[in-house]
Structures are given as structure tokens and as C-alpha cells.
Amino acid sequence: MTTTETRPARDDPAAPHAAAPHAAPSSRSTPAACGLPWGAAIPVAALSGLLLDVAFPSVGWWPLAFLSIAGGIWALVGRSVGGAFLVGFAYGAAFYFTHLMWVVQFLGPIPWVALAGLESLLFALGAIPIALAYRWGAALRHRATRTLLFPVLIAALWAARELLLGTWPYSGFPWGRIGMSQAGGPFAEAASWVGVTGLTFLIVWLCATVVDWAIRPRTRTGLLPAAVIFALLLMPAFPTSEAGSLRVGWVQGDGPAGYFDPRSPGDVLAAQRAASDPILDEAMDLLVWPEGGVDSDPLNTPATARTLDAVVADTDAPLLMNAATARGEHIYNTSLLWEGGGAEQLHDKANPVPFGEYVPDRWFYERIVPDLVGLIQREYTPGTNPPLVSVDGIQVGLAICFDVIYDSVIWDGARGGAQFYAFQTNNADFRGTDENLQQLEFARMRAIETGRAVVNVSTVGTSQVIAPDGTIIDGAPADTPAAAVTTVPLRTGLTPAVIVGPTLTLLIPIAALGGLLTLGLLERRSRTTSLPPAPASAKGGAAAEPPTKAS
């Protein structure tokens, strides 16, 4: 009697080498997957991470996101836990250290290395469950189960990792989400049905299906599930209802609004005021200035309040502006709807940027990088008020700068009745980098996801007015003063993305964890039932000879 012995791939140095006997597969069992050799897995993963960066602006070749995900998945097939971590880190580092290069412009290399390194580490940890799923996938004995359900698990695991990076630590950093890369492609409209996270899920599901088909003996019907997913990605946008239009003025002041720009008090306000002059005589219903367009607190500075009153009087329209405001013992990054004599409606930024607008655990980081931490003097408090203001009965949804990347802020605005969005941002600290174009891509996706127009106004650009379908209505290039009055379409009705988005955000991690645990239990049961029976005792008490290993 002979038995065969199977071992993990010898080219994975982190793989265990214990023997694991298996029963012969049945005719309906899943054939073994063909993964990459260890020497190729790391380069493929790193190249895939670089391709994902190119899928985003400024290059914006969105099809590369699919190649990137397929390469990242393929590199994980057959990997051990340690090998998966190394492969995931190679992918994550190649992506984040290039994608977030603009951070260097703000505070130098240390924050860039810290942020990109942390994101890469978390990404690598999230690669381990995906690799485990492939290792345990042999327990799926039926080809149909493997073809239909296994790629769903891989997509859920990838999307769950994306959600983790977007919520933890310190409220997370949901920058570089797969779904956000597709604003310029034919699949963006699917986001109006399933949201940005759902779009990520569909894209990874498609890629995982194709990879699974490619690494196993192929069948004629193996790509039918991929065709169905492809059709889902091509769903037309969910239609929201037209509700008229609004004449909105917007101004890109191009003032010295950067953290380290040389300036005197009032210079940013003066630049914003001067850039507004060309449109002050035009008829408008609302004037929008960017985040940081006013460099003093109008609630506590009478001279600033008088300047804003004059602007409102000249335009005969309310002014949506932004400034740092002090109320009680707290400081907020606040958008205010300034009308004659003051502002009764305001919204405070919900997610101040860690290490940019406040320092979490300041006592700890001051011991590590005291000079850098000392540059951040203000400690902005997270806002809790709704991201909405009302202009003559028309609800305007708001998002201040990086709040555009947080789903809950956008969904709260839509559920609160927003008929269009005004996104106010200050990109002055990142002049000459891809940051403002990446953020603008997020604004376009939010327009498509919610079926609402977006007025995205920046201090230094790029400012654009975006239609509900993501097309550009109006805009201005970066690094130049600009002002215009644009007719903005209004919409009502909620897209399915806004309705089911919170539920998907909850269900995807639960499904990922539950599916992985179930697969692990099936794999353990499969190993237990496939072990050979214990040797029977020979007559007279002598044990039978152990089986010899096949040569």
C-alpha cells in the first residue's frame, strides 16, 4: 500500500512543510489552483500596486484598476500567512507611497512615510484572509460552488479591508478606494445603485471570477458569471427627479491660503473679495466661497463680518463661506450661510484631519516628533450638526474638504433633502500635486452616486461644477483667480446607493468574516475525513507495518 504526500509550494519561504494527506478528488471536486512562483509574486504585487495609482488622476487610466486587482489577487494564490503579508505589503506600499506623494508637500517626508506605511501595513494584514480563502478553497468540492460563490467571498474580503482602512484608526482614511477610480469609465453609474463600496465589491468580484477561471482548468461556461457581473457594472444610473435649477455663483480666490504661505491677517479674505468682483453684478441665488476663504472668525471679528455683509449686499444673495470659528471652548472648521447681519445656519466639519487639523494623542506624538506636532496649534473639534443649509427653501448638501471621502456625510445630506451639493475645499497646501485632481474625482463620483449636481469650489483649484451624471458643466484651472455664475440643476429622490449604502457597509464585513470562518470549518472537516484509517493490529498483538511513501 502506498500513499502520496502534498506539500505547500517550495518557492514560498514562509509556507509550512508538514505532510497533509488527502483523499483522491471526486469527479465533481475542485481542481487545484495554479498560483505564481514566490519569486514572481512580489514583483507582480508591486507592479499591480503601481498600476492602481495610475488608474487615479492625474493619469486616470481607469481600466488599469482591473489589471491591478487581478494581479494582486493572483499573487496571493497559494501563499502562506507570512507570504500573504509580504505580498500584500508589496502591493500596498507600491500604491500608497506613490498615491499619497502629495503629503510630502505639506509636512515633509516623515508624515508621508507614517501615513503610507500605516496604510500599507493594514493593507498587508488584510491580504492574509484572502490568501487563507484560497488555501482553504480546496474544501469546496463542487465546481459550481467554487465558480459562483468563492469569488463573492474574495470580493467581500477585499471590500471589507477597504472599509477598515476608511474607519480606523482615528476615523480612518478612505482615500484610494477602488470605486473612486472609475469616475471617467463606463461603470461609474453603477455606484448610484450600490454606492462606492458596492462598486468596489462588483469590480473585485469580476476580477476574482476571471482569475479563478484562469488559474484552474477552464470550462466553456466558466466565464458566464463574469459576463453577468460585467452586465451589472454597466447598469445605467438610477434616475433622480428634476426639480428646477438654481443660479449659483462660485469664486476661486487663489489667495495665500496654504498653511505655510507668507501672508498678513486678512490677505486671504481680500483675495477672495477681489476675485468676486467680476460677478457681483450678475443675478444669482447663492454665492459660494471655498474652505478657508475667510481667514478670520466672522462670528467674533466685526471687521470681517462687515466685509461679508457688503458682499451679500452687492450680490443680493446669501454667501456660503467657510472659516475657523470659536464657540465656547471649542474651535471648529465651519461653513456658514452668511446673510445680512450674520449667519443663522452653519455646519461644522465632521471629520477633522488627524495631524492636519488636530493631533490625536498629542502627548504621545510630541515625544516622537515634537517639532512637527508643534506646527499644529489649533485643535479642531468634530462637528455634529447636519451637513445642510437651506436657501429659499432649497436644501444644499455640504462637505468640507476631506469630508467628501466619508460616505456618511454625503448620505446624511441626501437623506436630509439636499437638492445639490456644495463642496468647499482648500488645496493650497498641495499646489502642483495630484491631490486636488484626486479629490475632484471623488466629487464626481459623489454626484453620480447621489444623482445630484456638485459645486466643488477650491481656494486655488481645481474648481468645477459637476452635473448629476458626473459630466463637467463649468470650471476653472488651478492656480488662477476665477469666478462664474452657473445654472445648477436640482434633483430630488434618493438613489438606491443612499438607501442601502449603510446596510451594505454593515453586511459586507459580516459576510466576509462569516464566509471565511465557514470555509475554514469546511477545510478542517475535509482534512479530518480524508485522513487514512489508523493501522489495524495484526493477530498476536503485532502492529501492522506503516505504509511506505511513494517515491
Image: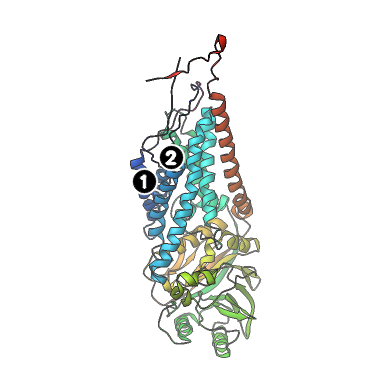
- Given residues 483 and 149, the one toward you in this image is 149
Query: Residue drawn at (53%, 15%), measured in percent from left and top?
Result: 543
Query: Residue drawn at (53%, 64%), measured in percent from left and top?
Result: 404
- Per the image, is 31 magenta? yes
Q: Residue 135: percent from the left, percent from the top? A: 48, 36
Q: Mark 2 points at which residue?
A: 79
Colour mapping used in the image: rainbow
Few, some or many residues within 10 Å of mark 2 (<14, 14–19, 20+): many
Residue 506 seen in the current view: yes
Q: In the figure, residue 59 lies in which quadrant?
A: bottom left
- Given residues 364 and 389, the one toward you in this image is 364
Secondary element at image label 1: helix
- Per the image, is 134 magenta? no
**Placement of 454 over or under 301, stated as above or below:** above
Picture quarter with the N terminus = top left
Name, please, the residue furthest toward the top.
539
Q: In the figure, residue 15 lies in which quadrant?
A: top left
Kind of residue at badge 1: Ile
- Given residues 314 and 527, the one toward you in this image is 527
Picture quarter with the C terminus = top left
Q: Name the residue under label 1.
A: 42
Between the C-alphas of marks 1 and 2, the distance is 11 Å
Q: Please tell me the numbered disc located at residue 500.
A: none
Prevailing SS of the magenta stretch = loop
Query: Residue drawn at (53%, 17%), measured in percent from left and top?
Result: 535
**Placement of 514 over or under 469, stated as above or below:** above
Q: Residue 186: percent from the left, percent from the top? A: 45, 50
Q: In the figure, residue 390 lies in which quadrant?
A: bottom right
Q: Which region shows up in magenta?
A: 26-33
Kind of residue at badge 2: Arg
Q: Residue 512: percent from the left, percent from the top? A: 57, 44
